[in-house]
Image (spheres, helix red, strand yellow):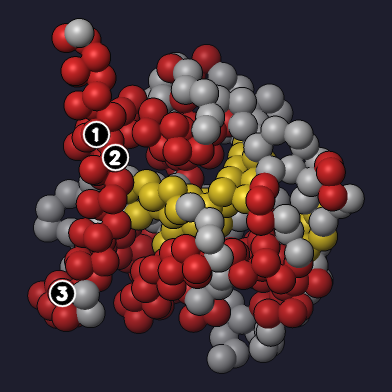
Amino acid sequence: MVSLYQRVPVDFQQVVQGIHLIDGDNIAPVILGISPCRSGSTVLLRVFGASGVPAHFQPLKNVLRWAMQDKEWEWTFPASRTPILIKETLGPYTQLEAEFNPFQIFKTIGYPLEKLQVMLVYREPLQTWSSWYKVWGEKTRFDIFVAAYRQIETIRQQVVEAGLPVVQFVYEAVRDFGPESAIRDMFAQLKLPYISQAIMDWDQLPAFAEPGSNIFFPVEHELFYAPYAHERAMQASHLQYFAGAEPLPGCTPEVVTQVEALHLNELYAFWRKENYSRIQKMADYEKTARRI
């Protein structure tokens, strides 16, 4: 479908051709974070960067977006002996972005899957859609949001079928368990050491995406640049949960009915159960250990 945001048809192979690996032993181990847009994933760049893990803002989707504008763009995996984070989001302008599959790119280019950890990031569906609506308005559509939300489950199943573990992180865990418990559990799954600066004292660090911050943004096509979309995450001094104020903008009775009918709430509950049960088990273990 040709539109302002997609001037020409783009096939998967065009994107693959713009992404390059370096020689095997020097390829960085990757934590691949995937979520629908507006799931709280941008602030995780700061969480990882503050912890010493280089964090990259959607370099793969950036190649796709340049291709959608009939321009070639390339990105090469950095060399590293320690993990890096690649954060990728699905949506919001086109169906092609909603159906984008970063995990499939890793498999197709021959990235060594033994070096890959996949982390899926979720947010309650109405909160997520409301954030889409507030940020992009008529530039996006509800059906694109639904496709992105469902695609995350498709990717989760593909990762499981490939024999890889899936790290699941629900943004609401920051609200319900507190930032420390939520991030401690995530880092434990990723086999990363936890430090307090992962969640606080960010005002003592270089500014978001500035040199020394460990956060890296690609050169984006100006059409996709949304300067206010990440303002709250970029200015935050600590990790916290932000919810949209009730009534949620964009969440009409028809949208609420559709979210329920399309089983998005069921998907979210399934993802949340896995994440929350792990955090609760960790909390129970630590409580028992303190009593001994």
Q: Circle 2 sits in a helix, a strand or a loop, which is it? A: helix
Q: Quadrant of residue 12?
A: bottom right
Q: Where does the N terminus fall, quadrant-wise?
A: bottom right
Q: Residue furthest bottom?
A: 1
Q: Mark 2 highlights which residue?
A: 278
Left/right of residue 274 with respect to residue 216 in the rendered view: left
Q: Where does the C terminus fall, quadrant-wise?
A: top left
Q: Mark 3 highlights which residue?
A: 260
Marks 2, 3: nearer the viewer: 2
Decide: is 171 above or below 96.
Answer: above
**Residue at 35% from the left image edge and 55% from the top image edge:** 122
Where residue 140 sits: x, y (%)?
41, 74
Q: Residue furthest right?
A: 23
* Residue type beneath disc 2: Arg
Residue 281 badge: 1
Where residue 135 sits: x, y (%)?
38, 59
* Residue type beneath disc 3: Glu
Residue nearer the viewer, 6 or 145 = 145
Left/right of residue 223 with respect to residue 290 in the rendered view: right
Where residue 290 sits: x, y (%)?
22, 10
* Residue type beneath disc 1: Lys
Q: Quadrant of residue 139?
A: bottom left
Q: Is residue 228 visible?
A: no
Q: Is residue 254 visible?
A: yes
Evaluate if marks 3 and 1 touch, with contact meaning CB atoms under 8 Å apart: no
Q: Circle 1 sits in a helix, a strand or a loop, which is it? A: helix
Evaluate if marks 2 and 1 touch, with contact meaning CB atoms under 8 Å apart: yes
Q: Circle 3 sits in a helix, a strand or a loop, which is it? A: helix
